[in-house]
Image (cartoon, grey):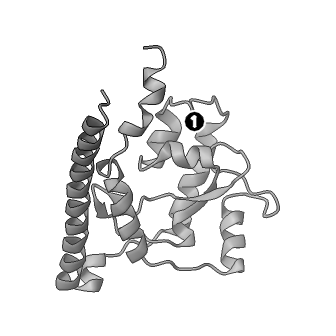
Amino acid sequence: MKYEKFFRNGKGETVRSRESTIRRAVFKNMIPWNTPTDKEIEESLEKLKMNKNDIRCVYCGEKATTLDHINSLVENKKPTGYINEIANLVPCCQSCNSSRGNKYWKDWMLNSNTEKSPKGRNIPDLEAKAKNIEDYINDMNPQKISIKDLLGEKKYNETMGLMEEVITLLVRLDDMCKENRKIIEKKLKYK
């Protein structure tokens, strides 16, 4: 069938495919946000060699539309210990932010040939841009904390346990919805 793939889009989405989104949301809600002052933002932009009136993506030089955590907040389904703070945030464009995902920034920036990555888009001067970011990280020294130590093991484990319970329930719900769809499709005599 010529249009089969186009009309099957709705069958591919599952709760399981949203598990990492749920984990990330839980951790991001738990990880502290140290709101920078205007002065700290201006100092940060200065260290990144940016014009405060024309903020650009640190990776590709396009107009910045968002911020990127230079050190990921979540890896391997657990918080890394890095927090939301000016020392761990850099201006970037949406294209670079979504392309990078959770990859180590320098490997992604200099080696990834994906369509949206700086290398994949043939952005010039990548080595100089990477050096600028490295200098920024070394100068700003992003803070790394132990969420488990700060919360205490009992509270941390309670939070992680509840998150796992929610994910388990969502997976069960996902399976139940698939079964329900099959029952409905059968009663409607769909293929």
Q: In which quarter of the image is the C terminus?
A: top left
Report the front residue among 45 and 56: 56
The residue at the point 57 percent across, 29 percent down is 120
Quadrant of res 9:
top left
- In percent of width and height, residue 73 lies at 40, 63
58 is higher (above) or lower (below) than 69: above
Residue at screen point 52% across, 40% down: 109
Q: In which quarter of the image is residue 65?
A: bottom right
User: Which corner quadrant of the image does residue 39 belong to?
Assistant: bottom right
List x then y, in percent, for residue 12.
36, 38
- Left of 38 or right of it: where is 113? left
Amino acid on which disc 1 is placed: Lys
Q: In which quarter of the image is the N terminus?
A: top left
Q: Among all residues in the image, which is located at the extreme right?
A: 53
Query: Relative to the observer, which residue lies in front, 47 or 14?
Result: 14
Q: In this rendered view, identify the residue nearer to me: 53 or 141.
A: 53
- Residue ranking furthest to the top: 1
Q: Is mark 1 on a helix, strand or loop?
A: loop
Task: Please give the residue where the numbered disc 1 appears in the rendered image.
Answer: 116
Residue 14 relative to residue 60: left or right:
left
Residues packed near mark 1 inside 10 Å, few (<14), some (14 to 19) or many (20 plus): some
Give above or below for 155 relative to 137: below
Residue drawn 46% across and 48% down? 101
Task: Give the x, y percent position of residue 77.
Answer: 28, 58
Q: How many labels does the image show?
A: 1
Give the side of residue 94 with respect to residue 52, left or right: left
Give the percent coordinates (x, y) of residue 59: 61, 46
Horizontally, residue 159 falls left or right of residue 53, namely left
